[in-house]
Image (spheres, rainbow, N blue to C red):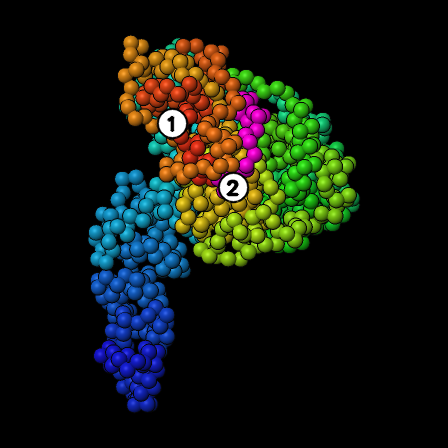
Amino acid sequence: MLESYKGWKGKGHSLEYYITNELARWLKEHPRDPQSGFKLKKLQSRAFGVLGESQSNLLEPLISIYQLQKADRNTLLGSVNHLYHKGKYKEAVILSTKLKLQPELDVEKMCTPLLLQDKANLVEDYVADYPHLQSQLLQIMDTWCHPTFNTRDIARQYQNVPPSRADKLNQKMLSKLVFRLLGQYNLDPALCPNVMNQRHLGTLRYLFYKRFVEKSMTQENWEDHIQNMVGENVWLQEQLIQLLISYCDAATAAQWALSYHLPSESLPAKVAEKMHELQHQERVEVTKERTYDSKMDKKNDHYYQLPIARENIHFLQTWEEVDKCREVVLQPGQVVGIDMEWRPPFGLVGRPRVSVLQIATKEHVYLLDLLQFSKLDQEEKEKELCHFIWKLFSDPSIIKLGYGMSGDLCSLSTTYPALREMEKQVQGILDLLQVDKQLQKNSGLWKKHHTLVESLRQEPSSITQSPRQAEKGLSLLVQNLLGKPLDKTEQLSNWEKRPLREEQILYAASDAYCLLEVYEVLCKDPAHFGLTANLKESLGGKQSTKPRAKKTLSKQGTQSPSKQVLASAGDTLSASAFPEISAKDFSVVCDTMLQGLARYLRCLGVDVCVLENTDDHRQAAEIARKEGRIILTSGLPYQKLQAQVGEGRCFSVNCSDKAKQQALSILKHFNVRVTLSDIFSRCQVCNCDKYLKISKEKMKHLMKISGYLSREDDTGCTKNPEEDWELCPKVETPALSETITEQLPSCAYNPNCRWLADSDLNAGSFTLKNGTTLQIRTIPLGVLEKTDLSHFYCCTQCGKVFWEGSHFGRVVSQFQEILDGSKPQTQSFYELS
């Protein structure tokens, strides 16, 4: 039969043509032959020779015409195995999928070569209808995610699978695939302990960064997340000890090791010694000693304070309390502020569920404990709650104020599937995120008001205090309109732990109530802010009405990621769609794959948050909604992320471009103005924008204290030192334009930051009073021999040390086409606060 088909093919006929004629001929010859059943089997056995040569789209008609579903199962399995042993893994899997032979085949044997060849789509089809095979597949993939596993060892067992092809299937790609399938198949993450351990380790590193580098998380919140994440997992406990040694000291690590009852032989020598000392103290405190940071935990009047009494904040946990809230909230003409809180998605699979729904009126704030209601398991009462929420959001006579309401509604529909259709019927919503964008567009009036507010702020504090992160999102809007920012230290707290702490309750109430005060300020004099006389004209669905000028943004959403083209200098999307914004006011969150782009943007003064390697892409949407950032991503994640944030808030980066070109395209697209003062205004390691200036002599002194530089000889240095800022790849520098060189003849970097004082340092050390250790050992000793170098710059957050070289002029040249031609501003962008 195969030879016959090849003859037909040689005459230019397709396989479909051949099959039709072959079958017609056979039926004509055997109209009612009692032996037709036997001859059909014979024809089926001959047909298997064609299956291996046919295209995948023809397998289904072939199977149907020759009735292969009714063929002998052993014969079918033999044909699949024959294809497999010939190295035709793809054909074997497709055929077994079409014939539904999966339960009788080894899932590991069939799927492994396809995974190694990056054909995960065929593997997903193979296990689609078989839950037990889905579990087996994920368990197999999880074993590959063990740190000691090498995919090349497996690839060698399969013909037609080169080991170099298997290298693409690294642990990072595998982990992402496993997490996607866990969510897709709704399986227990406990099936994949290796993948979960790696994700939890990444979360631990992120928590350490938030606590000890960024200093934006309280000790109590940090400990709560650490305990919840580590639990009884001994491997994670040991990783925690290693991180504590790096970020704290052996004594702190010993306290935690003691609380987890870790054996001393599994600990580093210094930690084991400290733990032994603790065990022999007269009073051993088994639970960890909490060393709260008084600077972070004490309340001060720097932040926005609720203007209502504490007794008017109601935490609702019973249905009777919800009924009283409904009577107040659903009054026609009511104005309410709405916000939601959920547990940060650290190491979680799937979307987070809303734990607390906040509804603020002028006199009261109601905090609905949705987590508690879900545990009551009362279906009828839950329907009533959903009806209340639906009625609130769909009533046009009630003004609902929010900030990034689209993301909140999306999370709410995840918590209550009955509310999934509610988004289409919401009315009377004023999303202040959209108003905030309009305020930024009306930059002249906005800056005038912002300058007035800034003049009322206190003078910057000394370096002895922990560096506070720049305000953003709703906190920045509240600061600009009400004079003080929101205290966001509870933002990343565990909202699923009960009872909630008093700090959490006040934070949740403030987030909702401040919307009412912002709205009141805007309504008093909307013309002052360049808004319409009646803000109610902006009321609409989940997002307020957008100007026609922004309609062009939808082009990016309708194209597939692979066909999206970034805006260039001539595109109408850049300047026309977005109001001009300064680099220091432009904030983004970058996917982990775009770290090179992130460094370039920080180099130009842009506020850039970068996901950790183990973070899920969905965390970018979480950060974007909470902090008002633009998402920069690429590939398939773009389609998912752009649906979770407002229009124009997610951008697909062309990965075929170099990082420099990506940065240029993004700055043009969003109409970002970069000045000479913005260059190197941020640390490209940690994103901090606060520096200290250190003289060469002072630096030599600190290097001697550290033992890095000999007191007897401080000139024995290596030659040809690395003299540039270690921030961007080096490239050949073309000549600067006359305009640039006239304004900055020497291209010197000279920010107006404060000189390091002895009072900024802990006595006899090279550690700042805020706990940051200066990374002086990263300085090549030969730099000290440079006669034209008089000082260094130190990041106050991560301790990275920089010095002036030729890199400043190089960056000016590289980004000359988007660099603002104005002279460097005289006001300080680097004063410490």
Residue type highlighted by circle 2? Ile
- In the image, taking residue 614 as reference, residue 401 lies left or right, namely right
Residue 449 visible: yes
Residue 543: which numbered mark, if any?
none
Q: Does the segment drawn in magenta span residue 819?
A: yes
**Residue 428 left/right relative to 348:** right
How far across and how far down the image is residue 288, in percent? 44, 21
User: Mark 2 highlights which residue?
Assistant: 818
Residue 270 lies, with reference to residue 722, above or below; the image says above
Residue at the spot 47% in from the left edge and 19% down from the top edge: 693
436 and 791: which one is in front?
A: 791
Residue 274 in percent (x, y) is at 34, 16
Vertical order, 781 against 605 (above or below): above
Q: Which of the marked residues, 1 or 2, is nearer the chain's N terminus? A: 1
Residue 341, relative to residue 117: is it above or below? above
Q: Nearer the viewer, residue 180 or 584?
A: 584
Q: Viewer-proximal residue, 335 or 238?
A: 335
Residue at 36% x, 55% y is 120
Q: Main secondary structure of the magenta part?
A: loop
Examine the image and state in which quarter residue 234 appears: top left
Callout 1 environment at 10 Å: few (<14), some (14 to 19), or many (20+)? some
